[in-house]
Amino acid sequence: MIPTGRLLALLLVPAAAAVFVWFRPDAGALWWSALAAVTLLAIADAVMARSIPTPAVDRRVPEVMGLNGAGKVGLSLGNASSRPIEMTVFDHYPDCLDVSGLPAAVRAAPGETSKIAYRVVPRRRGEFVFPRAQIRLRSPIGLWMHNRVVDTESRIRVYPDLAAAERYTALARGRHLHLLGIHARRRRGTGVDFHQLREYRAGDSLRQIDWKATARMQKFISRDYQEERNQDLIFLLDCGHRMRARHGDLSHFDHSLNAILLLTRVALRHGDAVGVATFGGNDTWVPPRRGSGAMRDILDALFDLYPSGDTPDYSQTAAGLLARHRKRALAIVVTNFRDEDSVELLPALKMLQRRHLVLLASLREQALDDALNGDVEDFDKALRVAAVHDYLGQRRDILERVRAEGVLGLDTAPRPLSASLVNRYLQIKQAGVL
């Protein structure tokens, strides 16, 4: 039971009586009467507050939310008593949420249900629990707030930020993918899979002309091609300690997740199957799958993963993929390598290359690019710039060695990773090298 301001104000009555008795000692009964009246009134109000039935609480939460995406949580409070009740409601929400709109003051008529909603913004991925709701019921006279706790468990899943993937779908319909930095180069009639025969059009290459059909129809007939479909794309995602590096509000791991989800959406729209294998402390395998359920499978497997403190084992990862998946695929290794990793990384990539087309996508720290910007104002700045150039030179050397082995290479800062991966995938599809 928590006293309200009304009770504290009521206590001023015996206090005033005490002051009066100080000057009129013969009026002591007045003070006792005032104190007894306030005490009995407070006790009676407390007893009535305890007799109020605890409101029924029903919570409505979004089943799934995206990281940093705003949503609403609703609470329904049913009044089972025969009188109106006033209450203050506070929900015990997970600490991963930024919340506004709590606590909330509610008035419920007899036998009716009142509803409130408050705004939430998830700041961390994973599955989280709302364990209980807390209600403070106002007593009938208003002297007390009676605290009640209602166990009502709800669960919510926070997925990676899907905004880029959803925006891709919207922009693809309007042919505005350049707004995402994606350059679709495909022209009608080009590709590697035969699609149909059609009449010759201005601009068709001589290689497209079907001479047998032209002789038969007595007019030029061209072959129409389309990009290959029904191919496999498999991400190999590093969950090791270096993926903890941060750029802005997100780690390299989260930037990688966002890029994977965007490219998954693109590949599924192109008719390919997508799978994921993680390594470096968190080992997960999602076999390649196409269709509407593939994105959900990947989200369910990755949404609660975080980078570990382990060092990635590239050789074991390559051997594991060769054992799991025998069909040729585009294997995209997403990691953050260092020059000391080359001793293990290069043999692992060559092992993968026996069966798959391999693309190494390595993230570099944004701080390296930032260090090269601006004027060199003093000797210390000059030393830092020289060290960064030396380090980036070593990375370029490793990447050139990777490319010399026939492995595709991509070295990028975290922010442009999504567009860079999508563009490289589209180039591979157009070239028909898979």
Image: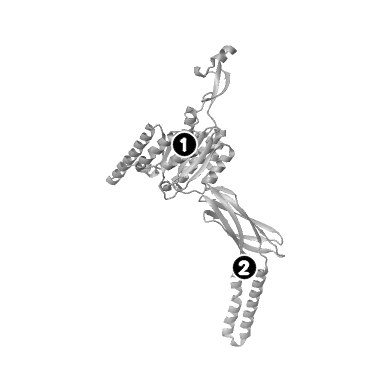
Task: Out of 105 and 419, give the one closest to the viewer.
Answer: 419
Which mark is nearer the camera, 2 or 1? 1
Q: Position of residue 139 (x, y in %)?
A: 65, 68
Mark 2 vs mark 1, CA separation in Å: 61 Å
Which residue shows up at 46% across the image and 36% down it? Answer: 331
Is label 2 in contact with label 1 (beta carbons under 8 Å)? no
Task: Out of 426 and 296, give the one closest to the viewer.
Answer: 296
Mark 1 lies on residue: 331
In the rendered view, does 306 fall on the left or right side of 345?
Answer: right
* Mark 1 residue element: strand
In the rendered view, does 420 fall on the left or right side of 87?
Answer: left
Kindly indicate the quadrant of the structure image that contains residue 414: top left
Q: Residue flagged by tag 2: what amino acid is it?
A: His
Mark 2 lies on residue: 146
**In the rendered view, would you say 7 is above or below 433?**
below
Q: Residues within 10 Å of mark 2 (few under 14, many from 20)?
A: some
Q: Position of residue 60 (x, y in %)?
A: 62, 53
